[in-house]
């Protein structure tokens, strides 16, 4: 029997995942009875010791420790998997995983059975793991090297309609699927090269943890409104850059679908609408009640002078009469 702390990769790029597993192996030919001892508390302590720092963790959340049959060097073993998680390094620092120890209960059988049967003597046996290390490599030079995701991804896309009238909405789904740190994936870049108004996407995520791998898909669902008639390749607006660790190169997922828009130019409609809106915006908050006009000081003086001249003229006519 032996305790193993293993990794599925000895070298990764920054952002590339590796899986770390802690398991106890017991050969089928082992006759000495072994039993787990205080597993929860021991696991809590050893995980603190070996868990890598400065990494994004995706835990496989093992709830039940059950034996599974495996073959090692042609021999049959029962493997008890106690902990498994994928780690994605966030910095270019090599990872060292120190050895850890766990206690198990081992029963020794008495040489001479008693009257009541075979006697068993309870004892503790400590098992140790070997140290491990993972080399973390920098990504190749690229303007977006510090921002691109790392993994093996492919694109699946869907468009609600290939033809739509200007001013009317359509739905577009950009799905990234594959193996990698799915939870951290960000939305595609929008080049704003097309006369289409894009609304922020809704996001749906499906994640699977199995066979020592993290894989799944993330869907970004957009609503778009074409503003001008024409034939448009959606890839001119929406694209997604990543680094493929197995191919050791950068790659781009770009939409291959096209949209045909027909109808009136919505920019002219918007301009007229904004002009009306501007008039009514200026009218807001104004006092619309009728008021007596209060002229300036000069106008008041002229009105007084004019009134005086009228009175003088009337008096002159009266005297002559």
Image (cartoon, helix red, strand yellow):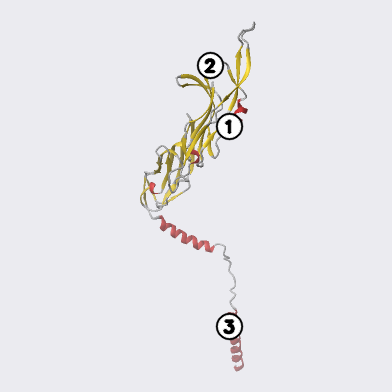
- Mark 2 is surrounded, within 10 Å at the Cα level, by few (under 14), some (14 to 19) or many (20 or more) other residues, namely few
The label number, if any, that marks residue 47 in the structure image: 1
Is residue 243 something one can see in this rendering? Answer: yes
Q: Are marks 2 and 3 in contact (CB under 8 Å)?
A: no
Q: Are marks 3 and 1 in contact (CB under 8 Å)?
A: no
Residue 164 x %, y %? 38, 47
The foreground one among 10 and 84 is 10
Q: Which residue is mark 2?
A: 30
Residue ID at (50%, 20%) = 77
How many marks do you count on the picture?
Answer: 3
The image quarter containing residue 3 is top right
Residue 208 x %, y %? 48, 33
The foreground one among 283 and 109 is 109
Residue ID at (62%, 28%) = 41
- Describe residue 49's horizontal placement relative to residue 185 as left or right: right
The foreground one among 277 and 143 is 143
The label number, if any, that marks residue 68 in the structure image: none
- Mark 3 is surrounded, within 10 Å at the Cα level, by few (under 14), some (14 to 19) or many (20 or more) other residues, namely few
Secondary structure beneath dot 1 equals helix
Residue 190 x %, y %? 43, 49
Q: Is residue 80 above or below residue 285?
A: above
Secondary structure beneath dot 3 equals helix
Q: Which residue is mark 3?
A: 302
The image quarter containing residue 98 is top right
Q: Quadrant of the N terminus?
A: top right
- Describe residue 5's horizontal placement relative to residue 319 as left or right: left
């Amino acid at each position: 029997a032996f305790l193993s702390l293993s990794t599925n990769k000895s070298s990764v790029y920054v952002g590339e995942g590796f899986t770390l597993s802690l398991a106890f192996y017991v050969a089928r030919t082992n006759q000495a009875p072994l039993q787990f001892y205080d597993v929860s508390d021991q696991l809590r302590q050893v995980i603190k010791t070996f868990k890598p720092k400065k990494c994004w963790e995706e835990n496989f959340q093992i709830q039940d420790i059950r034996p599974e049959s495996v073959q090692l060097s042609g021999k049959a073993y029962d493997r008890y998997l106690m902990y498994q998680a994928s780690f994605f390094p966030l910095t270019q620092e090599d990872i060292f995983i120190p050895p850890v120890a766990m206690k198990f209960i081992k029963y020794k059988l008495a040489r001479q059975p008693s009257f009541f049967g075979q006697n068993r003597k309870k004892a503790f046996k400590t098992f140790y793991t070997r140290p491990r290390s993972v080399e973390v490599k920098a990504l190749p030079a690229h303007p977006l090297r510090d921002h691109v995701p790392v993994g093996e991804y492919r694109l699946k896309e869907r468009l609600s309609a290939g033809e739509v009238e200007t001013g009317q909405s359509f739905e577009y789904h950009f799905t990234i699927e594959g193996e990698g740190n799915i939870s951290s994936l960000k939305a595609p870049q929008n080049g704003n090269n097309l006369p289409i108004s894009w609304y922020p996407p809704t996001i749906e995520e499906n994640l699977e943890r199995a066979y020592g791998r993290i894989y799944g898909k993330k869907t970004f669902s957009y609503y778009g409104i074409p503003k001008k008639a024409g034939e448009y390749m959606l890839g001119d607006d929406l694209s997604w850059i990543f680094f493929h660790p197995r191919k050791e190169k950068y790659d781009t997922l770009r939409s291959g679908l096209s949209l045909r828009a027909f109808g009136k130019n919505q920019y002219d409609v918007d301009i007229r609408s904004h002009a009306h809106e501007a008039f009514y915006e200026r009218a807001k908050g104004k006092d619309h009640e009728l008021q007596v006009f209060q002229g300036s000081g000069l106008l008041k003086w002229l009105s007084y002078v004019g009134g005086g001249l009228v009175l003088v003229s009337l008096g002159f006519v009266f005297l002559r009469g």
